[in-house]
Amino acid sequence: MILATLFSPLSLLLLLFFSISTLSFSHFVPTFPSSSKFHPELTTQLSRSSSSSSSNGLYETKFFTQTLDHFDYTPQSNHKFQQRYLFNDTHWGGANNNAPIFVYTGNEGNIEWFTQNTGFMFENAPRFQALLVFIEHRFYGKSVPFGGNREVAYANTSTLGYLSSTQALADYATLIIDLKKNISAIDSPVVVFGGSYGGMLAAWFRMKYPHVTIGALASSAPILHFPGLVSPYVFSDTIANDFRSEGENCYNVIKSSWKQIEDAGKTDKGLKLLQKSFRLCKNYSSDFLEGWLQSAWTYTAMTDYPTPSNFMNPLPAYPIRKMCEAIEKEKKRSAFEKLYAAANIYYNYSGSATCFDLDDHSDPHDLGGWQWQACSEMIMPLGVRKESMFPESEWSYKSRSDSCQFYYNTTPRPHWITTEFGGYHIHQVLKRSASNIIFFNGLRDPWSGGGVLKSISKTLVAIVAKEGAHHVDLRYSTKEDPKWLTHVREKEIKIIASWIKRYYRDLQL
């Protein structure tokens, strides 16, 4: 019944319509919406950096000749591609001082987007005299194998098969080791950072490559959101609770809307009413509209930040609260007008849109590769309980598998991630095998249910913020930040400083 926007992180990023199965929330694995315009946070922060190494004053763009396949020795494996990374040495203390290197493990998209929204690293580079490196994930942005030809790289499973988290982690290790050698910084400690899927990669990188990095800050990293580890309903439950916390009427208006939209979509008159009520550029089916609204509620919950943001779309502080206030202001109007007023907060807070195109397949952040990853290894179950504000929907691995067979002629491997990185009994396992990872989660973030919410040891620390949203700690600080957010960042900085201090002490032994 409901339009499923993408399988995608975390990421979640691109609209995908399944023609072979009933569309439901169980197909919807969001990270970031494809229709969002590029509003990088750092466009207003450029003056903070004195670097002259690039045209925007933030970073110099470089490329590394990367190996296509790190795990095989066939002729194809030796092929190379150009992997982009961004580099800022403005505050670096230098190789002679073994000054640290902070590395961002790139997400499922253009690395510039994530770099320009990770103010935490830029703000703390002077404190640590750190070199900043942001590495782009293979198959995304400009880091596309097969000559940089996206059509060839995305053509079929024979090429897309090289797009995986394990290959990406090996890319990062190879690039970091080579970079340290080239700048004569062999003994400089490396700390990795990441948010969402990038946070998952940061945590896994520390687990798999402890000889390359001394620690990881894994923000909003749902490393447990895989079959058999958490309930498939935690994601939708969190969204419902977020809206309900701002008002029972707000929650009820959204919950009761789906049948009203579906019923209206059955007649020409009803479709015209939907078009008029929601200011749509043309008539769309009710499935399109439901998916459009579902995206608004979901992504707003993910980015329910305490300060204004431009990460996905321009949004005010506490956007869920603003949505619910908009619904209350329209209490004497129709249900559709109430929904429009709320959705307008997400899609048109700047007030520039005159109508909405629901059939927008643009991909401004180069995020399309996630569709493949969600059909191979990133099998993150999502379902909806009857009590949720979304229509009830059972998680179905078969539906996912059927869809992947249809689009890629491939069968997902639902248990590969937990085989490769672990997850079962994680508190017992990591206590024996890992160290120096910070897991941050904000409980208003729908992905927090798949995160590590309890500290495992003195060096495997979970920081949980009741009011926090998706990797809010990595954002630029502002004067309006609440005290709890300031304290979270201070704690993270203190822990990272302890890792580096311990490293330098051990280096002298």
Image (tube, rainbow, N blue to C red):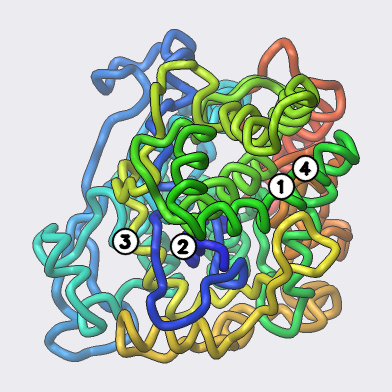
Residue 274: image location, x then y, percent: 51, 42
Secondary structure under badge 3? loop
- In percent of the image, x 78 and y 45: which residue is there? 444
Distance CA(mark 4)–CA(mark 2): 25 Å
Marks 1 and 3, the one that precedes in the sequence: 3
Helix, strand or loop at label 4? It is helix
* Lower position in the chain sequence, tag 4 or tag 2: 2
Residue position marked by numbered label 2 in the rendering? 6
Q: Residue at x 51, y 48 (%)?
A: 270
Pointer 1 residue: 499
Q: How many residues crowd around disc 3 within 10 Å: few (fewer than 14), some, or many (20 or more)?
A: many
Label 4, on which residue?
253
Quick one: label 1 or label 4, which is nearer the N terminus?
4
Is residue 316 shown left or right of residue 149? right
In the rendering, at what x and y percent does residue 174 appear?
35, 63
What residue is pinned by disc 3? 138
The Cα atoms of the two marked residues, 2 and 1, are separated by 39 Å
Are discs 2 and 3 less than 8 Å apart at CB? Answer: no
Q: Quadrant of the C terminus?
A: bottom right
State which tag comes first along the sequence, 2 or 3. 2
**Mark with earlier residue (3, 4):** 3
The amino acid marked with disc number 3 is Arg
